Image: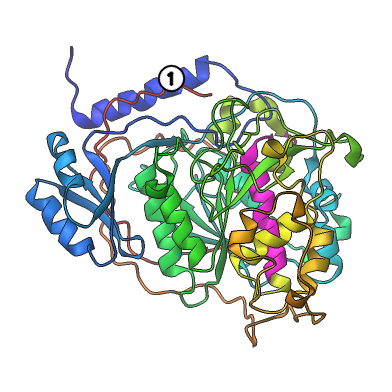
C-alpha cells in the first residue's frame, strides 16, 4: 500500500469523497438539507465531558496518558483531546470523567427528489402565519440568530446593513484567506435567506411587495454565522461542540444579542443520550437562554428515530411539512424524508413540523451544491431545497419573530407556545408530526397573554402533554402586551458587534485548504455586513483517519 504524506492523504480523501458524491445517487434539484452520515473520525480524537469542577484535573490526567489537548470548552465542562488509542479506557476511568466519546464526522448532505412545493418564502410566511407578526410590526428586530453551518456568502438578500456578522471559521478551510467564512458548499446561505433574508434597499415593512423582493421569515433579525463545514459539507462533532460553546460564551458580547441558535444538521446519537456530546452542548445553550432549533433529520421513516441533537429534551426539534403548494391545509402531510420519532416511554419525536419541501431561498453562486445540482437553480439568484434543515430555518425565523414581540420569553416558553398552538394534521401519526404544523397566528395570540417569566407549562408537564396539551391554567396568563421595540427596557440600537477579541491560535488543519472558490464575483452594492474581529480558533491539527462514509444518503 502506497504511503502518502499526511496532507496529500487528506487531499486524496476529499477528492475521493467528491467523486462518490458526483458519481452517485440522489443528486436532485431540490436537495440541500443536512442529513448525516457519521463514522469514526479517528480512534485518537476524543470529546471528554467532565463533572462540575473537574475540567482542570481531567486535562492534567489526560496529558499524563499522552493526550494532546486540541481545545477546551469551559462553559460545557468539555475538552477535546488527541489520545493514544490504547489509553481510551484508561481515560474513561479517570475521576471526574463523565464520558469520553470518539469524534464523529457530520456531513451536510441532501435528500432525494420530492414532489410538492411551498415555493418562495412569501408563501411560507403566509402559510405559517408569520405575516400576522409582520402586520403587528414585529419582524425579528433586536434578535440575533446564530447559524452554525457551512458559512454564509454575502449575496443580495444578505447585504442589508447590519444583516450579517461573520463569526469564527472552525472549518477545514479556515487557513485559506480566500475561503474563510464563506459558504463554499451552499447550505448555510440557503438557511440564512430563509431565516432573515431581506433584499438590499428594502425595509421589512415592504413585505406586501414580496412578490417582487426577497424576504425571509424574520427580515429584521440578524445572522451571526459560525462556519463549520467545508465545500463538501464536512465537519466533525468536536467542531460543532466548539461552535456551540462560542455562541454560549459570546451571546451577549457588546452589540450582540443571540437568542436563537439554528442547527440544521445532526448525527447518529450516542447509546446513552445523557452523555451525547452534541445533546449536552445544545442543552447547556438552552439553559443559558438560547432557543436551540434543530432539524429532526432526513432518512428512512423506520430507521430508529431522530438524529442527535434533536433527541435532546432541551431543544426545539423540527420535522418537515409538505403543503403540496395547494394553499389548502386539508391536504398537508409530513414529508416522506422527515425522520419520525419513537414515542415509547423515554423516547423522543419532533416537537412540530414546518414547511420544508422545495423552498426557494438564496443561491450561493459557485458553491458545491450550485455546481453539482444546477437544475435546482431558480433564475440567477435563487435555489430550491428540501429537508428538515429548511424546516428548522423556518422555525428559527419564527422564534426570532416571537422574541421581538416578547423579549422576556424563555426557551421553554417559546417551545411551549409553538407546541400548544400547532395545527394538528389529520391522518398523520404523532411520531411524524409531533404536536402538528406551526401556526404563528395562534402563537402570537397565546404569547400576548403570557405573564413575563412564566412558562406555558412546566418542563415536566411538557414531557407528558399528550392529548391534553391544549389545556392550561388561566392563572398563567395575563392580557398585557410587551412593546417589542424595546429590549429589557433599553431601545435596541442595532449597532454592529465590536466585541472582545477571542484569544486563540490558528486551527492548524495541516491538510487540504480547499479548492479555489469558482463562484461569480459579488455584483451590486458593497457588502455592509460586520466581520468578527477576533483571533482565530485555538485548535490543533485535524487528525483524520480514513473516511468511512459510503457517500451521500
The answer to whether any part of residue 159 appears in the image is no
Report the residue at 54% width, 33% height from top: 35
Left or right: residue 493 compared with residue 312: right
Q: Position of residue 467 (x, y in %)?
A: 76, 49
Q: Furthest residue to the bottom?
A: 489
Q: Choose between 86 and 475: the one closer to the eye.
A: 475
Identify the magenta region: 378-403
- Picture quarter containing residue 529? bottom right
Q: Position of residue 180 (x, y in %)?
A: 42, 49
Is 383 contained in the magenta span? yes
Residue 339: percent from left, percent from top: 62, 33
* Magenta: main secondary structure: helix
Q: Quadrant of residue 296?
A: top right
SS of the residue at dot 1? Answer: loop
List x then y, in percent, for residue 419: 72, 55
Question: In the rendered image of this protein, does residue 400 appear above or below residue 100?
Answer: below
Q: Residue at x 17, y 47 (%)?
A: 93
* Residue that mark 1 sits on: 550
Q: Is residue 27 above or below residue 59?
A: above
Q: Is residue 245 above or below residue 310?
A: below
Q: How is the image coloured?
A: rainbow
In the image, farthest residue toward the top: 1
Amino acid at each position: 500500500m502506497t504511503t502518502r504524506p499526511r496532507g496529500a492523504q487528506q487531499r486524496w480523501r476529499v477528492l475521493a469523497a467528491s467523486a462518490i458524491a458526483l458519481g452517485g445517487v440522489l443528486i436532485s434539484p431540490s436537495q440541500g438539507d443536512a442529513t448525516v452520515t457519521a463514522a469514526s473520525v479517528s480512534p485518537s480524537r476524543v470529546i471528554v465531558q467532565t463533572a462540575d469542577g473537574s475540567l482542570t484535573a481531567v486535562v492534567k490526567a489526560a496529558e499524563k496518558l499522552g493526550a494532546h489537548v486540541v481545545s477546551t470548552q469551559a462553559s460545557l465542562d468539555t475538552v477535546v483531546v488527541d489520545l493514544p488509542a490504547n489509553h481510551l479506557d484508561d481515560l474513561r476511568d479517570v475521576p471526574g470523567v463523565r464520558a469520553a466519546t470518539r469524534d464523529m464526522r457530520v456531513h451536510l448532505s441532501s435528500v432525494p427528489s420530492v414532489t410538492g412545493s411551498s415555493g418562495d418564502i412569501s408563501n411560507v410566511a403566509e402559510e405559517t402565519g408569520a405575516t400576522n407578526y409582520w402586520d403587528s410590526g414585529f419582524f425579528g428586530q433586536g434578535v440575533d440568530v446564530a447559524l452554525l453551518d457551512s458559512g454564509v456568502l454575502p449575496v443580495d438578500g444578505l447585504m442589508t446593513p447590519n444583516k450579517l456578522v461573520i463569526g469564527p471559521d472552525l472549518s477545514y478551510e479556515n487557513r485559506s484567506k480566500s475561503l474563510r467564512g464563506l459558504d463554499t458548499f451552499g447550505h448555510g446561505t440557503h438557511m440564512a435567506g430563509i431565516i432573515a433574508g431581506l433584499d438590499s434597499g428594502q425595509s421589512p415593512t415592504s413585505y406586501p411587495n414580496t412578490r417582487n423582493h426577497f424576504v425571509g421569515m424574520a427580515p429584521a433579525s440578524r445572522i451571526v454565522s459560525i462556519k463549520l463545514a467545508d465545500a463538501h459539507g464536512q465537519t466533525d462533532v468536536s467542531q460543532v461542540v466548539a461552535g456551540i460553546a462560542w455562541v454560549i460564551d459570546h451571546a451577549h458580547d457588546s452589540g450582540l444579542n443571540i437568542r436563537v441558535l439554528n442547527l440544521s444538521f445532526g448525527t447518529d446519537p450516542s447509546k446513552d443520550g445523557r452523555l451525547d456530546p452534541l445533546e449536552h452542548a445544545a442543552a447547556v445553550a438552552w439553559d443559558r437562554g438560547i432557543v436551540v432549533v434543530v432539524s429532526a433529520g432526513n432518512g428512512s421513516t423506520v430507521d430508529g428515530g431522530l438524529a442527535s441533537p434533536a433527541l435532546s429534551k432541551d431543544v426545539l426539534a423540527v420535522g418537515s411539512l409538505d403543503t403540496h403548494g395547494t394553499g389548502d391545509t386539508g391536504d398537508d402531510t409530513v414529508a416522506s424524508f422527515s425522520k419520525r420519532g419513537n414515542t415509547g416511554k423515554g423516547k423522543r419525536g419532533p416537537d412540530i413540523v414546518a414547511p420544508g419541501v422545495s423552498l426557494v431561498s438564496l443561491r450561493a453562486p459557485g458553491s458545491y451544491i450550485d455546481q453539482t445540482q444546477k437544475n435546482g437553480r431558480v433564475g440567477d439568484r435563487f435555489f430550491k431545497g428540501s429537508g428538515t434543515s429548511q424546516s428548522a430555518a423556518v422555525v428559527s425565523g419564527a422564534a426570532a419573530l416571537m422574541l421581538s414581540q416578547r423579549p422576556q420569553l424563555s426557551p421553554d416558553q417559546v417551545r411551549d407556545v409553538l407546541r400548544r398552538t400547532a395545527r394538528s394534521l389529520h391522518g398523520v401519526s404523532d411520531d411524524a408530526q409531533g404536536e402538528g404544523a406551526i401556526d404563528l397566528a395562534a402563537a402570537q395570540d397565546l404569547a400576548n397573554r403570557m405573564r413575563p417569566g412564566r412558562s406555558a407549562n412546566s418542563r415536566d408537564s411538557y414531557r407528558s402533554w399528550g392529548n391534553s396539551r391544549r389545556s392550561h391554567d388561566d392563572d398563567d396568563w395575563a392580557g398585557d402586551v410587551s412593546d417589542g421595540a424595546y429590549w429589557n427596557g433599553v431601545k435596541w440600537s442595532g449597532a454592529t458587534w465590536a466585541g472582545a477579541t477571542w484569544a486563540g491560535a490558528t486551527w492548524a488543519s495541516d491538510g487540504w485548504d480547499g479548492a479555489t472558490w469558482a463562484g461569480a464575483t459579488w455584483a451590486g452594492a458593497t457588502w455592509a455586513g460586520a466581520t468578527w474581529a477576533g483571533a482565530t480558533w485555538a485548535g490543533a491539527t485535524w487528525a483524520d483517519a480514513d473516511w468511512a462514509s459510503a457517500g451521500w444518503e
